[in-house]
Amino acid sequence: MGRHWLIPLLIVVAVIVFSSHGLKGGPEISVRDAATLIKNEPRLVIVDVRERADYEQGHIANAISVPSADFKARLNSLKLPKYEALILYSTDDTQARDATKHLYENGYQGALTLKGGLDAWRAAGMGLVKPRQP
């Protein structure tokens, strides 16, 4: 509704953060800001870059699983939006930083790493979901 300004604002902030972080791994987003973005932007793409078995043990709601080992090879087939926010996470953010950097270098200007990864998400008391069993 009236919150369409949030995405461009976060992208601008991400560009500023990336400039200050250089090649360290791209822009980051805090758990609090990520939770707000997830709540207010239903089209937001969330990418879990951990191994599939870890994803199946619990992940952020609506996240897609793209293990870091497959990430670069699958990038074109994922059809991720280039100009909208994307949140990537791993257990502690190490693998996600690499994936975010790769996305950013390939024109995905809204790519953000969840700062502290799933460890920080859990520590903040945020919930996880498990895939539905057939």
Image (tube, grey):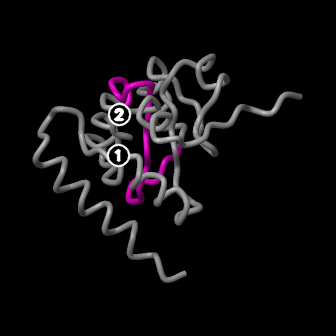
Q: Position of residue 131 (x, y in %)?
A: 74, 32
| Range shown magenta | 79-96
Q: For the residues marked 1 and 2, what is the alpha-carbon distance in whole angstroms?
A: 12 Å
* Residue depicted at 46% across the width and 59% down the height: 37
Instruction: State the quadrant of the C terminus.
Output: top right
* Residue depicted at 50% across the width and 34% down the height: 122
Which quarter of the figure has residue 129?
A: top right
Q: Position of residue 34 (x, y in %)?
A: 43, 52
Q: Residue furthest right?
A: 134
Mark 1 touching mark 2, by CB under 8 A?
no
What is the crowding at mark 2: few (fewer than 14 residues within 10 Å), some, or many (at least 20)?
many
Identify the amino acid type marked 2: Gly
Considering the numbered disc 2 on the image, is that residue within a helix, a strand or a loop? loop
* In this picture, residue 113 sits left or right of residue 65: left
Which residue bears the numbered disc 2?
A: 116
* In this picture, residue 84 sits left or right of residue 38: left
Q: Position of residue 81 (x, y in %)?
A: 46, 53
Q: Position of residue 118 (x, y in %)?
A: 47, 32
* In this picture, residue 54 sits left or right of residue 134: left
Instruction: Indicate yes or no whether the magenta region holds residue 81.
Output: yes
